[in-house]
Image (spheres, helix red, strand yellow):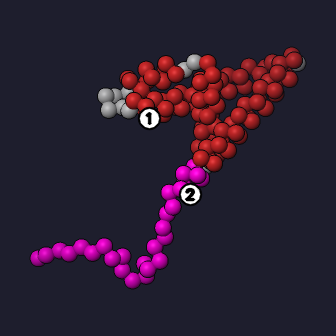
Amino acid sequence: MQLSCSLDPGPGFDNVPTVDPGVGLSGSAVGAFLSTLLGGTILVALALLMVLLAITIVGIIVVIPLAIVVGLAWAAGASVAFLAIADRLVGREDGWLKPLLVAALFNGGLVSFAVGAAGFGALLRDWQE
């Protein structure tokens, strides 16, 4: 008994869609830009809201848990983003120790702020989908 294999999709499959990789890349870039912009906008709005609420005595009760939640979301987003960047730079063939160390080295100053904002935007994008 001999089996044969054909790459012909058969009847009814004459119109196979083609995929342009440029469209996927530009769509991904636009999506990343918009989700980061949305994340930054939310952070600025929350910061202004927390300042206004902190002025009132009753608002302080709301500000403290809100600040904790925003801080945790920022830290989670920054950690994910730093690990993704470090994984791209050094790889993880030897395990996760090397990317973790590189991510820890990146965590500082302006780089930390930019990556944290991008990571927070990515978390929001995943949450929206």
Q: Quadrant of residue 59?
A: top right
Residue identifier under label 1: 88
The mark found on residue 23 in the picture is 2
Query: Of 61 and 98, which appears nearest the observer?
Result: 98
Spatial CA distance of label 1 from label 2 is 23 Å
x 74%, y 36%: residue: 41
Query: Could you tell me how many numbered marks the image carries?
Result: 2
Picture layout, residue 34 above or below residue 2: above
Type of amino acid at the residue the image marks with label 2: Val
In the orientation shown, which residue stands out farthest toward the left?
Answer: 1
Query: Of 73 and 116, which appears nearest the observer?
Result: 116
Q: Quadrant of residue 72?
A: top right
In the orientation shown, which residue stands out farthest toward the bottom?
Answer: 11
Where disc 1 sits, the SS reads helix
In the orientation shown, which residue stands out farthest toward the right?
Answer: 56
Q: In the shown orientation, is residue 109 left or right of residue 51? A: left
Q: In the shown orientation, is residue 71 left or right of residue 41? A: left
Type of amino acid at the residue the image marks with label 1: Arg
Query: Where residue 47 sits: x, y (%)?
Result: 77, 26
Q: Per the image, is 13 magenta?
A: yes
Magenta stretch bounds: 1-28
Residue 72 visible in image: no
Label 1 or label 2, whichever comes before in sequence order: 2
Picture layout, residue 16 above or below residue 33: below
Tell me which secondary structure the magenta stretch mostly adopts: loop
Q: Quadrant of the N terminus?
A: bottom left
x 33%, y 77%: residue: 8
x 82%, y 21%: residue: 51
Query: Where residue 33 sits: x, y (%)?
Result: 65, 43
Q: In the shown orientation, is residue 72 left or right of residue 19? A: right
